[in-house]
Amino acid sequence: MSDKKNDIFSDPEMSLYLDDLLRNIRLNVLEIYVKPYKSVSMDYLAKEINISVREVRQLLSELILEERIDASIDQLSGFL
């Protein structure tokens, strides 16, 4: 039996949509994670969803700009 995960990633048509799908999933997960907090570390969020702090910052910025979360980013201390 072949590994289906590898088959999906090697499919040329699916690869066109995987980046957008993964980005949307991460946005939704981040939105759910941050809602109950007044303040949360971007390091913590990065570890929880297994991406870099830079990517977390970009995704959080997008959520803020789209007004999906009411927050601000403190880049010096690394907190939302």
Image: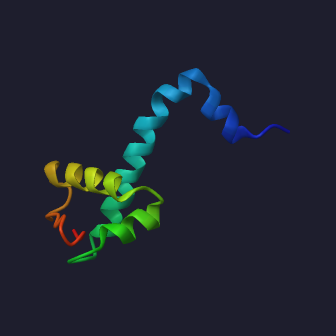
Q: Left or right: where does residue 29 sit relative to residue 13?
A: left
Q: Quadrant of the N terminus?
A: top right
Residue 39 vertical position relative to residue 58 in the rendered view, above or below: below
Q: Left or right: where does residue 1 sit relative to residue 65?
A: right
Q: Residue furthest right?
A: 1
Q: Residue 7: x and y, percent?
A: 69, 32
Count of picture labels: 0
Corner quadrant of residue 56: bottom left
The residue depicted at 36 percent of the width and 54 percent of the height is 28
Q: Residue 58: x and y, percent?
A: 27, 50
Residue 63 vertical position relative to residue 44 in the rendered view, above or below: above
The residue depicted at 25 percent of the width and 56 percent of the height is 60
Q: Left or right: where does residue 12 sit relative to residue 20?
A: right
Q: Residue 29: x and y, percent?
A: 39, 59
Q: Residue furthest front?
A: 76
Residue 17 vertical position relative to residue 77 in the rendered view, above or below: above
Q: Residue 14: x and y, percent?
A: 55, 28
The residue depicted at 37 percent of the width and 45 percent of the height is 24
Corner quadrant of residue 31: bottom left
Q: Nearer the viewer, residue 54 or 21?
A: 54
